[in-house]
Amino acid sequence: MDLLFALKAAILGVVEGLTEFLPVSSTGHLIIFSNLLKFSDNTAFANMFTMVIQLGAILAVLVLYRKKIWDTIVHLFPSKNVSFEKSGLYFWLMIVISCVPAAAIGIPFDDLIEEKLFNPLVVACALFVGGLWMMYAESKLRGNQTTSLSTTKITAKMAIIVGLFQVLSIVPGMSRSASTIIGGWVAGFSTVAAAEYSFFLAIPVMFGQALLNILKAQGTLLASEWIALGIGFVVSFIVALAVIGSFISYLQKKPMKVFAIYRIIFAFVVLGVGMLGLF
């Protein structure tokens, strides 16, 4: 096993864990840092790595929100004490509804998206545009509520709105977290509820993307590449565990504008690095 290759995988795992749930685009950051680190000459593997290690961060959601997830399983079906709208079946149905728009576009055009959009220039442009959009959306749409997802009544209309906004995250650099949180504001979620809904929405989305990429690469990966995937997965899980709780605490008290400003600054840094020929 190439130790340098393993170290690069670990670094990308840290990047993934830090950025997956923040509105700054984890995929965009992984594309940038993968290029800077010269992670792999195999572009197909590098793109697959970017998608698959996100499962580590999703596992952190399963751990931190295990009580909520278990509650949806225990109360999966309506009963005398649990109405349909409060059942786990209803909750996961809303999640599925939100997943449909992005899946309808992302699955058929997955290869084309990776070929045309997975590059630093697209990421920089999306980071910049998305940062401006975040500031505008927060000034116009964000409420002062800090209610959680458990106290929010979700409707099919709300689920569809969030799902339509999630389509924007197909462009690396736009950020699935930012797109769904803004979609949540439009739909009527509080900021905390929108962020938590985004976490749950990531579960089927990321599992689907990872499975699709693993099936495409089946039988073609080297032993060292499997090990790198494992390292990236574990590191991203550990880092994401720490990030999720801190992010929710931050949103309860402070605006998202700081992330928008970071995106804009980082976009110019990426463009500058690109002009120096370091990609």
Image (cartoon, grey):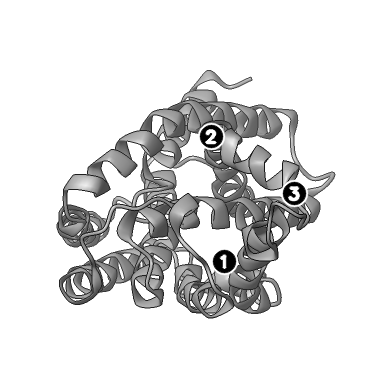
- Residue at the location (43% across, 66% down)? 180
Kind of residue at badge 3: Ile
Kind of residue at badge 1: Glu
Kind of residue at badge 2: Ala
Say which residue label 3 marks: 214
Q: Where is residue 257 drawn, in percent x and y?
A: 16, 59
Quadrant (top left, top right, bottom left, bottom right) of the N terminus: top right
Query: Which of the two residues, 66 or 205, is positioned nearer the viewer here?
Result: 66
Q: Where is residue 215 drawn, in percent x and y?
A: 80, 53
Task: Identify the disc placed on residue 114.
Answer: 1
In the image, residue 21 sits, relative to residue 28, either above or below, namely above
Q: What is the C-alpha distance between the residues marked 2 and 3?
A: 20 Å
Q: Earlier in the sequence, mark 2 or mark 3?
A: 2
In the image, residue 213 sits, relative to residue 118, either above or below, namely above
Q: Is residue 133 left or right of residue 58?
A: left
Q: Look at the numbered disc 2 and give the secondary structure of its residue.
A: helix
